[in-house]
Image: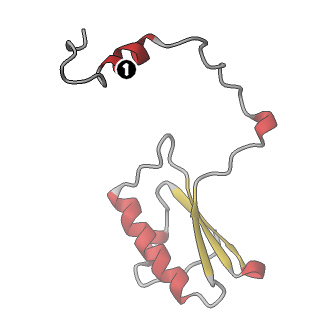
Amino acid sequence: MNKLVHKAQKLLAELDGFRVEIREADSRADIILDRPHFNIVSMLQREQLRVVFEALDDDPRVRVIVVSGPRLPPKSARPLRSPPATGKRRSARRFDCCFQSSIAPSCS
C-alpha cells in the first residue's frame, strides 16, 4: 500500500480485511476487499474504510476510487463445477403444486 495520510493515522497502521492500491499513472485508487468467504465488513474495517476514503479524497494523485473483491484467476485455472442434474428435481415438483388455485387441495 502506498502511504496515505490522515488525522486518524493509527487506524491505517494495519488494515483489517482489505488493501489499498494506488495507480498514480491512472489517477486511480483500488480498495480491494479480501475477507474470505463473503467479505463481511467488521466495525473496525468500517471505520478504517471511512478513514481510507477521507484520505483518498484529500490525495491529489487520486481522481477515481474503485471498490472490488479479490481478482479471480483466469477461467482456465478455476476448478470446474459439477454439471447440473438432468431431469426435473423433486423439490421443483413440490413447489409447482403450491401455485395451483386456492380450490385445489394443499401441497403434501
Residue at 40 percent of width and 79 percent of height? 8
On the image, which quarter does residue 2 sit in? bottom right
Q: Could you say whether the residue bearing mark 1 is in a helix, strand or loop?
A: helix
Q: In this view, does 4 lie to the left or right of 102?
A: right
Closer-to-camera residue (29/83):
83
> x%, y% of residue 94?
35, 14
Closer-to-camera residue (10/54):
54
- Residue 5 visible to an observer of this rendering: no
Q: Mark 1 points at which residue?
A: 96
Residue at 71 percent of width and 28 percent of height? 79
Q: In this view, does 5 lie to the left or right of 108?
A: right
Question: Which quadrant of the figure contains the C terminus?
Answer: top left
- Going by the numbered disc 1, the residue's amino acid type is Asp
> x%, y% of residue 57?
52, 85
Q: In this view, does 98 lie to the left or right of 15?
A: left
> x%, y% of residue 81?
66, 24
Residue at 38 percent of width and 64 percent of height? 46
Closer-to-camera residue (84/4):
84
